[in-house]
Amino acid sequence: MTPGQYPATRLRRTRQAPFIRSMVRETALTPANLIQPLFVAEGGLAGPVGSMPGVQRLTLEQLVAECRELVKLGVPAVALFPVTPQEKKSDDGAEALNADSLMVRSIKAVKDAVPEIGVIADVALDPYTSHGHDGVLNAQGYVDNEATCEILRRQALLYSRSGADIVAPSDMMDGRVNHIRQVLERDHRHNTLIMAYAAKYASAFYGPFREAVGSQANLGKGGKETYQMDPANTDEALREVALDLQEGADIVMVKPGLPYLDIIRRVKDEFAVPVAAYQVSGEYAMLKAAAQNGWLDERKAMLEALLCFRRAGADMILSYYSKQAAIWLAE
Ligand code: PBG
């Protein structure tokens, strides 16, 4: 274009009014894209989570009521996370295999009362270990990959048999999806889906979650860098995803969310499979804190963040805001 000429293309034309903006919009966010993570607790452990204003540790009764509301709002699935009292935690996380654990009773209660909602059961040992790690430790204090996989596959089978529609290994052991898929097939549980936390990073953004489930105190100053991914890496995420798909994952997850949108995009472009993104507890806490200070418009900022996950290539988003987003999207 030479100076002084009129431009042939004016991109503002398609932005001038709502009717045309809605027609050229490339991605959409609907409640069907959302998954609500829920914390469940019993005894005196139910109640608000300090670092996640608006989020509750629910009793079993509240959990069922919440699932009923979510179905009405069009949110198709929930991810359940149990809060375990200290006295039930042990070095080997044995409570993970208790057929009458709070997690098992939660899955059954939800599927019993609200069968149409999809139930996602997290598979990892951190809610149950006295040291707060996702697996069991060897004599050197290193998380033992094979010993952990042995437990994880039994945990996944227990949750599938209890009615979980999706099992979601969040532990990052090598080969665990293979273990889980094999044990499910042998048990003729062909339709149990596996949502693999495939590219899960060793992130500081999980802090509020660890407070919510009470694993932070157990973990102490220790981190999970020997099994969760280095935030510096991106090619490695593709290798993780490739392996989990080969081993039988149906859905692959990238976690955390917003700082990792580039990973979501690469995974979607490379594999063209269902991709989940997890807007984690620290991301929720940041938005909440800014909103509570009047520094951000919560509704706009939150819906924008969720839409950006869709634009980056996520088919589904785990978010503590899911219910609120569904309410706002319906207005
Ligand atoms: C544990 C697990 C974590 C989250 C989901 N499953 C925390 C961790 O790895 O320490 C984090 C979720 C969040 O921060 O919202 N296996």
Image (cartoon, grey):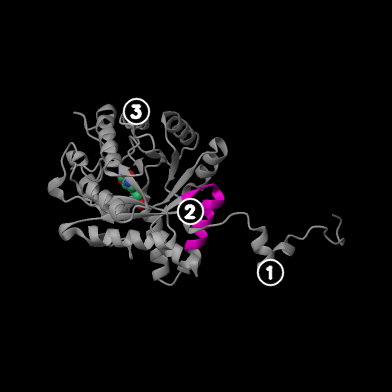
Q: Is residue 225 left or right of residue 213?
A: right
Q: Which residue is mark 1?
A: 17
**Residue 124: x and y, percent?**
29, 40
- Give the crowd class for mark 2: few <14, some 14-19, many >=20 residues within 10 Å: many
**Residue 291: x and y, percent?**
42, 68
**Residue 85: x and y, percent?**
16, 51
Principal secondary structure, stretch drawn in magenta:
helix
User: Helix or strand or loop: what does disc 1 sit on?
Assistant: loop
Residue 99 appears in the picture as rendered: yes
Q: Which mark is residue 182?
A: 3
Question: Residue flagged by tag 2: what amino acid is it?
Answer: Asn
**Residue 261: x and y, percent?**
51, 48
**Between 109 and 235, the one nearer to me in the picture:** 109
Residue drawn where x is 21% and y is 29% of the image: 138
Q: Which residue is mark 2?
A: 33
Indicate which label's residue lies in the foreground, 2 or 1. Answer: 2
Which corner quadrant holds the N terminus? bottom right
User: Helix or strand or loop: what does disc 3 sit on?
Assistant: helix
